[in-house]
Amino acid sequence: MIPYGRQSVTDDDIESVVSVLRSDFLTQGPVVPKFEDVISAYCGSRFAVAATNATSSLHLAAMALGLGPGDSLWTSAITFVASANCARYCGATVGLVDIDSRTVNLCPSALERKLKRAKEKGCLPKILVPVHMAGHSCDMEAIGELASVYGIRVIEDASHAIGGKFQGEPIGSCRYSDVTVFSFHPVKIITTGEGGVAVTNDESVAQRMDLLRSHGITRDQALMDCESDGPWFYQQVALGHNYRMTDIQAALGISQMQRLDEYVMRRNELASRYHRLLRGLPLEILEVQAGTLSSYHLFVVRLKLGSIKRSHKEVFVGLRQRGIGVNLHYIPIYRQPYYRSLGLNADECPQAEAYYHDAITLPLYPTLTYEDQDYVIEALGDLLE
Ligand SMILES: *Cc1c(COP(=O)(O)O)cnc(C)c1O
């Protein structure tokens, strides 16, 4: 089976992990802050806070921005459930914004319309979570402007997008957002096994995320409500979680970061080869907005169902039967029974609904060979005849 994505782990990566295993620290020790420094230096953000995975990073970011019961958080209708779940962990409600059909990112004009209506009704969201789908940056300038007009905080879900750029700046610079979150799950651009990092330029948000990832416990006198009782002393000043990354994971991350640019280049090269060789087939390829560099986490095509004999499902199953691990990213959030039961539906999301009926994710990862890629293209060509 040719999977849709897969990690690359080198001997150097393994060496880095083994050296941590031989050291005194296995949980959060000296390597986690080093990894955080590597990430913030790469992105050009002031602070980075590592966590067990991007799901917990999203939760930490939402908590640090003060999300709670009575608030709402909006995200894209097409994303992984974790982008929405962070709101529910905080007791807040979820609203969904439709996508732009060409990029499959949250559509700024749909967002503007929805914000206008919400303002009239007095129910503006506290936080917006735009998702850089497939590694293609959202229009962060347009989103950032709307967020400042309506007084909304922004968490970029950049789980797909480390190594990408918007207006020449790395995703994670947080120029148009409060926090940006990366995932290091093995299918993503680089991996730490499980792992996530939240970057920000706001010192108080960074400190809050740091506190909340470790039970809400502090040894910092400035955060305590009394003088320390002695060298053993600490105080729990908030209800936090145990969301700490381990040094084992961080060591893998530091080692993987050295190859990030190389991986993004290779993914772009394979993507442009797909573009070239799929030309003429009855399908559309997601657009990358001008002035951005995609990290190309995913290569998504949309079938022109009016021009082919087979159905979406038949093409999908046909590819799987030929040993091609295609996938569908993602089932719209409002189609999940959990969110349906909370009253979400497709009404405001016609573009997301259309996408669900014709999208397929093709294999794309740095070690994908031209031969395997040709096999995928040929199989797709056969099925679309
Ligand atoms: C993978 C992913 C997440 C969650 O990442 P984990 O590190 O697995 O928790 C969140 N949002 C999006 C868009 C993702 O693709």
Image (cartoon, rainbow, N blue to C red):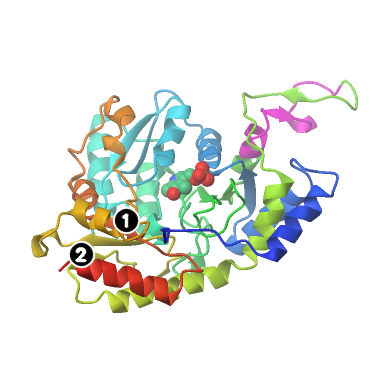
Q: Nearer the viewer, residue 340 or 372?
A: 372
Residue 93 to residue 377: above or below = above
Q: Position of residue 96 (x, y in %)?
A: 30, 40
Q: Please tell me which of labels 2 and 1 falls first in the chain.
A: 1
Whether residue 222 is in magenta: the answer is: yes
Q: Position of residue 90 (x, y in %)?
A: 47, 28
Horizontally, is 377 left or right of 147 in the view? left
Tell me the kind of residue under disc 1. Arg
Q: Position of residue 277 (x, y in %)?
A: 29, 78
Horizontally, is 242 left or right of 119 in the view? right
Element at label 2: helix
Which residues are drawn in magenta?
208-228
In the figure, residue 25 lies in which quadrant?
Answer: top right
The crowding category of the residue bearing disc 2, from other C-alpha atoms within 10 Å (few below 14, some 14 to 19, many at least 20), is some
Q: Nearer the viewer, residue 276 or 126?
A: 276
Question: Can residue 80 be seen here?
Answer: yes
Q: Nearer the viewer, residue 369 or 63?
A: 369
Whether residue 12 is in magenta: the answer is: no
In the figure, residue 300 lies in which quadrant?
Answer: bottom left
Q: How many marks?
A: 2
The crowding category of the residue bearing disc 1, from other C-alpha atoms within 10 Å (few below 14, some 14 to 19, many at least 20), is some
Question: Can residue 102 be seen here?
Answer: no
Residue 58 to residue 273: above or below = above
Q: Nearer the viewer, residue 17 or 157?
A: 17
The single residue placed furthest to the right in the displayed view is: 230
Q: What residue is pinned by disc 2?
A: 383
Horizontally, is 215 left or right of 72 in the view? right
Q: Residue at x 54, y 53 (%)?
A: 186
Q: What residue is pinned by disc 1?
A: 320
Marks 2 and 1, how far apart in space?
A: 12 Å
Q: Residue at x 21, y 44 (%)?
A: 349
Element at label 1: helix
